[in-house]
Image (tube, rainbow, N blue to C red):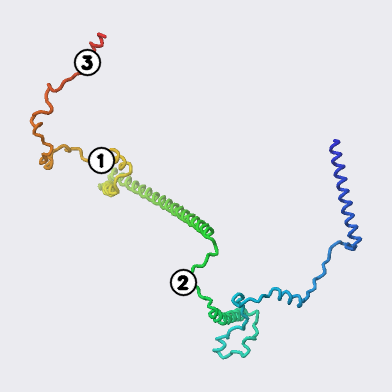
Amino acid sequence: MGDMEEDMQIGQESEEEYGELSDGELQEAFAKGLLKPGLNIPLEEPKKAVNDTEGLKKCLTELKKSLPWVERLDITNNPAVDVLAKVEGRLDKNQGSEEVNAEDDFQREMFFYRQAQASVLEALPKLKKLQILTKRPDDYFAEMAKTDQHMQKIRKKLMQKQMQIEKSEKAKKLREQRKFGKKVQVEVLQKRQKQKKAMMTAVKKYQKGLTDKLDFLDGDQEEKKGSATSKPQMSKKGPNAKRKYKDQKFGFGGKKKGSKRNTRESHNDVSGFRASTAHGKGGKKFGKAGKKNKRPGKEARRKMKGRK
């Protein structure tokens, strides 16, 4: 509690100090005549425009430099002759001192155009005398106002926008394809249901003896024929990826029946014939004598185990 009271006293003292200072400042301002009775709102007097011609001329002489015309490139002239007015015969004698209506946009812009035309006609001969080129060569490439990095950023943004547009178009196409696929699926199911209903009604009529025709069975045969004709068309596409992988891993089986049968080429081929081994002369010995079973029989092996 003692600390709280001390803080309150310090705050009151500081406020009193600030209040005394601010009151003293106000009293000083009032003594100097800066403050007037009433609302203390400063009223600024309107500024008087002063046409100081001598001062302006001094500034002009300081800024003016005696530079050649090539460095200045300034031309003061009257506008060029109005060709249309000259042709129509309404050309005034005082062509340079004609008054221009500032509110008439067309007249004002034409005056600017004619003045620019006159300045070009006057400046080009001067530049040619000074041997200064006025036309850009055909193989001249001006420096870009924007850097290559900035243009690359713009290109990236344009590419991103283009990719987004392409993605949205693809998504729209997929949605349309899905809708079309669902529509086709519904139509196929409805067609099957109609065919099934028609077949059931035909079977019932045949069972009741109302008809002797079996035309409803022809539809199944036609469907089987259609499926049989469609199978070879599907096989034209070739084996699927699973079949190709297995063929690559295990090899393509091919025809096995009659693979060891002799042909004309194999019959005429005698490159593998050896006279030394032909007709049992040398080489392997056939028969029982050639076969020697070194392993003892089952009974002998059992007796050998019993001895141990």
The CA distance from mark 2 to mark 3 is 107 Å
Task: Determine the image quadrant of residue 53.
Answer: bottom right
Q: Residue at x 10, y 34 (%)?
A: 274
The CA distance from mark 2 to mark 1 is 68 Å
Residue 220 locus on image (x, y percent)? 28, 46
Q: Residue at x 15, y 22 (%)?
A: 291
Q: Earlier in the sequence, mark 2 or mark 1?
A: 2
Q: Residue at x 53, y 64 (%)?
A: 144
Name the disc covering residue 252, or none.
1
Q: Do callouts 2 and 1 mark residues in contact (Cβ within 8 Å)?
A: no
Q: Do callouts 1 and 3 mark residues in contact (Cβ within 8 Å)?
A: no
Q: Which residue extends farthest top?
A: 307
Q: Do callouts 2 and 3 mark residues in contact (Cβ within 8 Å)?
A: no
> Disc 2 marks which residue?
138
Residue 49 locus on image (x, y percent)? 78, 74
Considering depth in this image, is 281 or 92 the residue closer to the camera?
281
Considering depth in this image, is 160 or 21 the residue closer to the camera?
21
Label 2: element kind: loop
Q: Residue at x 54, y 61 (%)?
A: 147
> Disc 3 marks which residue?
298
Considering depth in this image, is 40 or 71 the residue closer to the camera?
71
Q: Nearer the viewer, mark 2 or mark 1?
A: 2
Q: Earlier in the sequence, mark 2 or mark 3?
A: 2
